[in-house]
Amino acid sequence: MLLSNVQLSDGGSYRVIVSNVLGTAVSPGVLLTTIGALPFVAVPPLDQTNFCGDSALFQVTADGSAPFGYQWQFFGTNLDSATTTNLLLNNVTPDQVGPYTVVITNAFGSITSSVARFYLNLEPPLITSSLSATTFQGQAFSYTITGLHTPLSFGASGLPPGLFIDPTTGIISGVNLESGTFGPIISTINACTSDSESLVMTIISAAPIIASALTATGTEGTPFTYRIRAFNIPTNYGALNLPIGLSVNPLTGIISGTPTYAGNFSSTIFASNVWGFGSANLSFSFSNETICFPRPPPKMACLLAPKRASSLPRQPASFSKAIWCSILPPAWHRFQTATPTIMASPTAWTP
């Protein structure tokens, strides 16, 4: 028979009864005398060195007659709820630096362990979160400050408009109201010291960016249409110094109309929303209108021409400022408004 974890109550006389088909026999009694032993420390607690804000763990192993009771002490004073083989110190501070012991008890007495000292390293709660952040104007933003050694609180100064910090969690959040590059100072704080860094924040503008072509062509006297297009959801459009005959629809961004004059023109187009506006220069190029007119009756083709013309029959000639009549005019004349010139191949001319 094996008795495990012998207790004082296990002491006394023990016999064994042996039996078979012929009968039964009882052995002589054997006396078990239990002796109580004082507790003793098998493995003592060891010194600990930790950073401010971290955790420290003391442990002890006892031997002797179980069961055991434990009471940890700091400077000889009992610590509340410290009655197991382990003593865990969370988020350590300078107030916890000093000597720790544990009193071990059983039914036969008690013993106090050797002193284990706690030392504190005052390294700052160094910031570990990224020191750069990129976001967009008008969008929700969230950034969490993190640091070593369990910071107790957080800070941020010089945040862009629309952003705020929760000093307990270190979360910077809100909606970015302005665009640009900002450099708020963020910080972590624990019971011993603090750390601070500059956070580079790049907020990309949400103002429209013109995306349509910046050149447009057409012909004078011919209906013309061009649409302003832009990124970032514009809500309004406009244009300055449009060629005569054209106008812009502020809701759709469509420039339309009939250009009055030929030539090259430059206008400023823009698109806007609640976050700002974007603009660009738009170049127009309108060519001359070509006019065709039918063959007049014989001897009635009267044209503006110089009083004298140097041209041979059936050769091109240019005319202006005087009246000439063609006996056999061409079937069609082409008149360009840029220069009052008639191009023809006359067979004969009569002044």
Image (cartoon, rainbow, N blue to C red):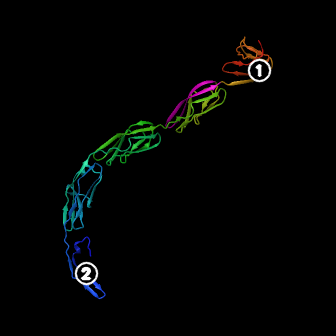
The answer, for residue 160, to whether it is visible in the render is: no
Name the amino acid, label 1: Pro
- Density class for disc 2 (Cα within 10 Å; few <14, some 14-19, many ≥20) is few
Residue 341 vs residue 11: left or right?
A: right
Residue 168 vs residue 280: left or right?
A: left
Image coords of residue 305 (percent x, y): 72, 14
Name the amino acid, label 2: Val
* Vertical placement of residue 336 versus 247, above or below: above
- Tell me the residue at 30%/47% (across/down): 190
Residue 274 vs residue 170: left or right?
A: right
Front residue of this view, candidates 22 and 198: 22
**Residue 11 falls in image quadrant:** bottom left
Quarter the N terminus occupies: bottom left
The residue indicated by pointer 1 is: 330
User: Is residue 65 in the magenta section?
Assistant: no
Please, what secondary structure does the residue beneath circle 1 have? loop
The answer, for residue 24, to whether it is visible in the render is: yes
User: Is residue 270 in the magenta section?
Assistant: yes
The residue indicated by pointer 2 is: 16
Image coords of residue 139 (percent x, y): 47, 42
What is the distance, in whole Å, between disc 1 and disc 2 at their CAs?
148 Å
